[in-house]
Image (cartoon, grey):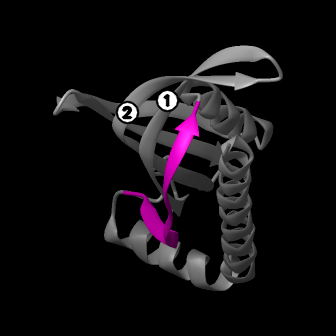
Amino acid sequence: MSEIDIIVPELKIVQDAIIDIPEFFKMMKTWLKNHRFYNLESEYEEGTKEQLKTSKTKLDSSKRVDDYTEYKIITIVKFHDQKPIMVETKGRKHKKTQCRLDIKIVSKIKSDYEGGWEGSPLKKFLRGVYDVFVTGGKKARLESELKNLTEEFYNELKAYLKLQQI
């Protein structure tokens, strides 16, 4: 079984926003794709409360670093109390959504994602020795790289939302 280490437990963005939701997801997926992450929309929920729409989307993004290690960035985006509005920019009208936005980002490193060290207790012991003595310094470097990528993604989302404010 693979081992999962949580590198960034939780980064959150909570704010009221006027946003083009499809464009926001396009920006998120483009950033992740440009950093060589594979994106999977693993969960989608939608509901209505008091005539206002609420939706939740979970985006699982993964990137294989080497034959043993995989980065994972999990992004959960919730749009509460959605209300469609028309916004005029540069003389043109655009459909946007006024809502309460809640974004949560978690990043993890998954070691032995293919299960190559599974099986007998001897293999598990050898894996422990390998993790400590062979990949010790490499693991710290990978954790730092994933933390930096996650913070860069978080800052990119915040900057995009700030640009969308009227």
From the image, give the main secondary structure of the stretch colored magenta: strand
Residue under pointer 2: 82
Name the kind of residue labelled 2 in the image.
Answer: Gln
What secondary structure is marked by label 1?
strand
Residue under pointer 1: 97
Q: Of residues 82 and 8, which is closer to you in this image?
A: 82
Residue 158, given in percent of the width and then of the height, sits at 66, 56
Please say whether residue 92 is one of the residues in the magenta stretch: no
Residue 100, given in percent of the width and then of the height, sits at 41, 47
Horizontal side of 96 relative to 160 (left or right) equals left
Name the kind of residue labelled 1 in the image.
Answer: Thr
Residue 95 quadrant? top right
Q: Residue at x 79, y 37 (%)?
A: 34
Residue 91, given in percent of the width and then of the height, sits at 80, 17
Which quadrant is home to the C terminus? top right
Residue 41 quadrant? top left
Relative to 162, say whether 155 is above or below. Answer: below
Boundaries of the magenta span: 1-19
